[in-house]
Amino acid sequence: MTHPAPLAATRTPGGGQHHTREGLALIGALAVTQTIGYGVLFYVFAVFLTSVTRDLHTTPAVVTGALTLGILVTAAASVPAGRWLDRHGGRALMTAGSVLAVISVLAWSQVRTPAQLYAVFALIGLASAMVLYEPAFAVVIRHFAQSRRQGALLAVTLVAGFASSIFLPLAGQLEIHLGWRNAVVVLAAILAVTIPLHAFAVPKRHTVQPKTSTEPGDGQRRQIVHTALRERGFWLLTLAFLAQGAAVAAISVHLIAYLTSRGHSPAFAATTAGLLGVLSVTGRILTTGVTRRLPIGLVTAAVFALQAAAAAALPALGGTRAGAIICVTAFGLGFGVAAIARSAILAARYGTTAYATLSGAQALPITLAKAAAPLAAAGVAAASGYSTVPAAAAGACVLAAVCLFTARQPAG
């Protein structure tokens, strides 16, 4: 079987080769902006949780609620953001989102009450819907031909996969030396790098990928969306990624507590849980390689089934160090696969004309499920013990695999 053409080679509407450097510049810019965006807008929250709680004279639960609100706002904003992207392209939306993100993070450094914190994270949630994976993937999907999309998405997510590894220790050191408020100001300055990258590297309109000379209108987009939303396959895909996303969210939050409940030391539990981030990158590389020869839907369903087996085996094997590492490794290989797979499957099935709108429609319930799953898992653990958490995650991954296998790709 032949291998895909070089990653960034694309065709203009006129049929000529688009310069490779522009495609590489887009990939490089988005890799940087996604790494910084996820690092500052999401991961560093955990570093400052204790200090913010103390300064605001409140509880960790109240402070954590601000992050939850931000996630909910991101979910709600994903649908209108997708519509904008399909109509106008990504440059204006992502640049404006970067500006809003910087202003919001600066405001975070000045909050004095929980109400102010919640208002700030509502804005951060809105900015996240404008600058993180959903819009970035939409830009990549529309920019590259189908044979090159997975490679482009892989390149962006490989770098962004290290966001937590970079920004968690960086934020920790900044807090030690500057205090949390000044640390947040420094992080806002770093986040400002994303403004020119989005302004100059993201295409203004969808004019790079091969397509007809007639720009699709709103009527055509509405028809595609209307047809997809009435199709059983669309909702099977949505349910598949919703179930797997919920399982991943629950395991990632509760894994350390589960392992310590099985008698492992906190240090071993934390180190083992830390494998998940590294393995997410490994899983993306392996999956992208395999999908050169097999349909991505089939490969992703197999990965979800592997995660189900790993989670189901955790109660039996997790009491030993070797068993825990084996189960976490197998489960972790699927951690980062869904981000690439959902985009590629959706674009292959429905095309790119209304991709961002459809992706936003899927992102709403998926994001809500990810936000609710850790809380639901905590309730299950309190009622039945921690051993039921991996069992529930295994069931969710089985459901995901079955739904994805059932929602077959269109012929050709």
Image (cartoon, rainbow, N blue to C red):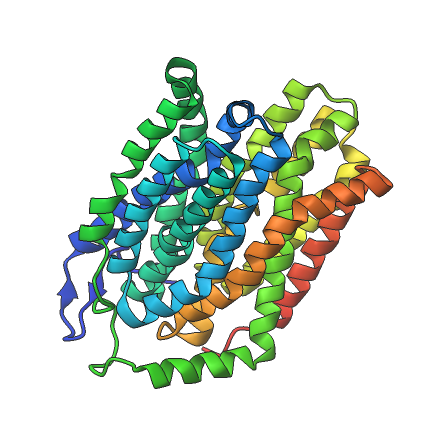
Is residue 265 in sight in this rendering?
yes
Q: Residue at x 35, y 23 (%)?
A: 182
* Residue 383 higher or lower than 198, as above or below: above
Residue 288 in the image, given as x and y percentages of width and height? 45, 53
Is residue 294 in sight in this rendering?
no
Quarter occupied by the N terminus: bottom left
Q: Residue at x 65, y 50 (%)?
A: 372
Total count of labels? 0
Q: Residue at x 49, y 58 (%)?
A: 341
* Residue 345 higher or lower than 175, as above or below: below
- Front-most of 6 and 149? 149
* Residue 119 higher or lower than 412, as above or below: above
Residue 49 in the image, given as x and y percentages of width and height? 54, 28
Q: Is 366 placed left or right of 93 in the picture?
A: right
Q: Is 368 placed left or right of 293 in the picture?
A: right
Q: Is 391 placed left or right of 230 in the picture?
A: right
Residue 3 in the image, given as x and y percentages of width and height? 35, 59
Residue 99 in the image, given as x and y percentages of width and height? 28, 47
Residue 22 picture quarter: bottom left
* Outermost residue toward the top in this view: 177
- Front-most of 2 and 33? 33
